[in-house]
Amino acid sequence: MYNLTLGILAHVDAGKTTLSEALLYTSGAIRAAGRVDHGDAFLDTDAMEKERGITIFAKQAVLSLGRYAVTLLDTPGHADFSAETERTLDVLDYAVLCVSGSEGVQSHTRTLMRLLERYHVPVFIFVNKMDQPGTDKARLLAELQKEFGGECVDFSAVDSAEWLEETASCDETLMNTYLETGMFSHEAAAEAIRGRKLFPCCFGSALKLDGIQEFAGTMAEFFRVPVFGESFGAKVFKVSRDEQGIRLTHMKITGGSLKVRDVLKGTDRRGAPWEEKVSQLRVYNGARFEAVNEAACGTVCAAAGLTHSWQGEGLGACEDAPVPFLKPVLHYQLLLPPETDAALLYPKLTQLEDEDPEVTFVWKKALREIDVEVMGEVQTEILTAQIRSRFGTEAAFGKGTVLYKETITDTVEGVGHYEPLRHYAEVHLLMEPAGPGSGLLYGTDCSEDILAVNWQKLVLTHLKEREFPGVLTGSPVTDMKITLVTGRASVKHTEGGDFREATYRAVRQGLMQAHSVLLEPLYEYRLEVPSSCVGRAMNDLQKMAGQEGEFIQNGDTAIFTGKAPVVEMQDYYREVNAYSGGAGRLSLAFCGYGRCHNEEEVCASAGYDPREDAENPSCSVFCGHGAAYIVPWDEVTSHMHLENVYRPASAIQERTGVPVNMAVPVRHFNDWIDPDEVDAILSKTSSSNRKERGEKGGKWRYSRNLQGAKAPEGGKPAAPPAKRTVYADRRDEMLLVDGYNVIFAWEGLSSLAAENIDAARGKLLDILSNYQGMKHCGLIAVFDAYRIKEHPVEAYQYHNIEVVYTKTAQTADAYIEKFAYENKGKYRITVVTSDGLEQIIIRSQGCALLSSRDFEESVRLENERMREYLESMHE
């Protein structure tokens, strides 16, 4: 027997649990098929499920289909519990999508199909309730093909000529074989199913067991064994607690095996490592379980003894699951009896959050209140029952509000500095808009020579450990990429908490300067009303800022589909029932976030002032005269010890005169070098064994900023030192370098160019970059591109200098002449060239000249001065 995991998904009331019961019964796993409405379903074991007649928690059962031992996962169908469904998708080998024959494809059905595509799960479709009046197989198949593509093929008559032709049209490999031989094997069709190129469709009635045997036979015939790894791996998809309160981690073994008393390792949600021993392994079948000593590949089991595991975590060789698509959309205040202490109850409620991460409890310390984020109203009823049964508290929920989010539309560099006395950290983060629904993405583009890898990892950990509130309403920020681009630590003074403060402040400072927009959750709706109500429905949808999709007139029924804000649609079903006399139907499914339709109104209502949010400061902390002082977010950039890495395109265009379509990151050199960095550099030189000199034999110190010096240990605060910069800031000076003229004038570059012109050009740019770092003037390197056909003028940033490639039919000389003429009143311009004619023209513009040979000598002298400067610092 081969192990497989099969999930059953459906829109609410499509008959999903009835289908599960029918499959268990026909396979011999149970003696009688239970019914949801009778409260005796094998898989709906929870008291709340029996009371409400819906599936709330994912359950598992074991059955045999042909040569396969199948773990069947029955998932909730109600949209409010769809997050529970999504969590199971990452462990499925195959899925059954159950569609109601009487209702057809619903909004939530589309959501489920998108989720199955996102997790790359092969799908079998079963159209249920075909015994009800008005169902039409051909119409339903056409609807499936319209909604989900031509890959939906009727498998009622496998191997028939019609089946062969329709199946072959879904896959190129099948089609080639079919055209050559007139048929293809079931093995080839099974591979197409596993590759999601083919969706087998079967029809029947689960309640009457009509077509169930045939459907089970189809799956057994076209299932294929998944590939498991040899090394241990497991995917965690659920966390629960049994009646005794034992915490259970439900997982699927994807490689190797797991035994009782094995030690598992992982990282918790904040990135902290954990290591724990498995005390028990359970294989559940309905409400019962069997304790086993070992779980083999493909087994779905529950492990006891793990206290830090989380849903979506990958163990061993397995990677973590993708960030869930479905998120809470409603926000409620938890109302508690007067005798209940909210501060004592809150830690207990985190158990529920542990089991259902999409339910989020927020403790408001100042107000001593608890807020809850959930998917919908039905979920609040379940939470009320859970709080009552587990913690003996009668809780209620206030009026629900929509859970908004925020994002940015432009790219900024957020900076944060944290330097109270004997602490030090500076962080620069590039913050860019990401695609809708992408959440928060993190990365690093910082050299380990600038910031050690351990500090970089710490910054990323701090970015991931919390949600960041936006600056419009304080709602969570999403759909943004944050990249660490530079930072600084002190060997002596930096502690771990320093980077937390600097990172948080950098994010906040970036949000303050960025253009933020408000996002609101959207529902995908399907509204069915009598034809007499079409005018009312259209008017309502327009007032609710609905985005129209399709309008279908089906006899006496009108069907509207589209998207609309959750805040407008959440209570609309009551109105539909009222004006349609109970004949209308509204189905809603969460479909992500979009731009808020009434942003100004929501922001004004929230009354949020980011400057007054003491828990999320955007300012930075610096040290001067031996004491810390605060610099506001809009002034902090000029105080930073590292210059910004990101420069907007407008700045490059202003310097070069060349339009640039995108912003470019740029690396800058500092006027000042951190003393710890100087010590580290000099310790590697031959003079590192010299005795360090200074006051009382200690190291010479000077300020990390220009506003004051640090006090020597045990002494009084020192006065600000004289600014010992060897190289003054000359940003009003501009140096224009004729690139190819210099390359062929310098012997070293000329010989390199004879072998590889690109290498010579790259080496020159590095030399110019270093030279600019010492001279601190503007520097533009200009290269001819006039021989390249249809080449536009091109400008980009290379570290701390600008590089220009001229357009077709324009020489570097011509570009330099034009720049000199247009900017002679703005900059003190010096041109590096040995072209005699060019020198005459440049002099006529009042610009200074430097021959390529003289410039080579200037570069040599500047390098020598820097070397002497560093050596003097050590003496």
Image: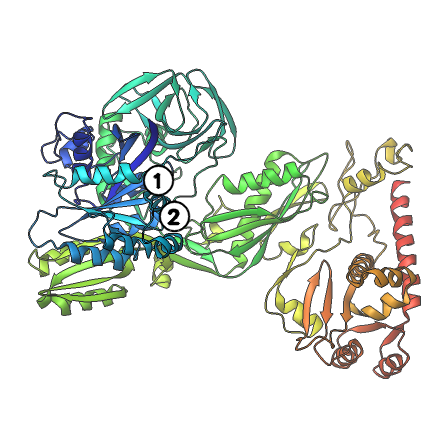
**What residue type is disc 2 on?**
Arg
Q: Position of residue 356 (x, y in %)?
A: 33, 35
Q: How far apart are labels 2 and 1 at the CA level? A: 9 Å
Residue at x 25% of width, y 50% of height = 109
Left or right relative to 717: residue 697: right
Q: Position of residue 202 (x, y in %)?
A: 21, 46
> What numbered label is drawn on residue 89?
1
Where is 741 relative to 156, above or below?
below
Residue nearest the observer in this picture, 391 or 356 = 356
**What residue type is disc 1 on?**
Leu
How has the structure been colored for display?
Answer: rainbow
Q: Position of residue 142 (x, y in %)?
A: 21, 58
Residue at x 27% of width, y 31% of height = 66
Residue at x 50% of width, y 46% of height = 616
Left or right relative to 413: residue 75: left
Residue nearest the observer in this picture, 561 or 755 = 755
| Mark 2: few/some/many CA within 10 Å (<14, 14-19, 20+) | few
Q: Which residue is mark 2?
A: 118
Please identify the quarter of the rendering in which residue 520 is found.
bottom left
> Callout 2: helix, strand or loop?
helix
Left or right relative to 392: residue 819: right
Q: Quadrant of the N terminus?
A: top left
Where is 621 relative to 410, above or below?
above
Task: Evaluate whether residue 173 shows in this view.
Answer: yes
Q: Earlier in the sequence, mark 2 or mark 1?
A: 1
| Mark 1: few/some/many CA within 10 Å (<14, 14-19, 20+) | many
Badges 2 and 1: C-beta atoms under 8 Å apart?
yes
Q: Position of residue 731 (x, y in %)?
A: 76, 65
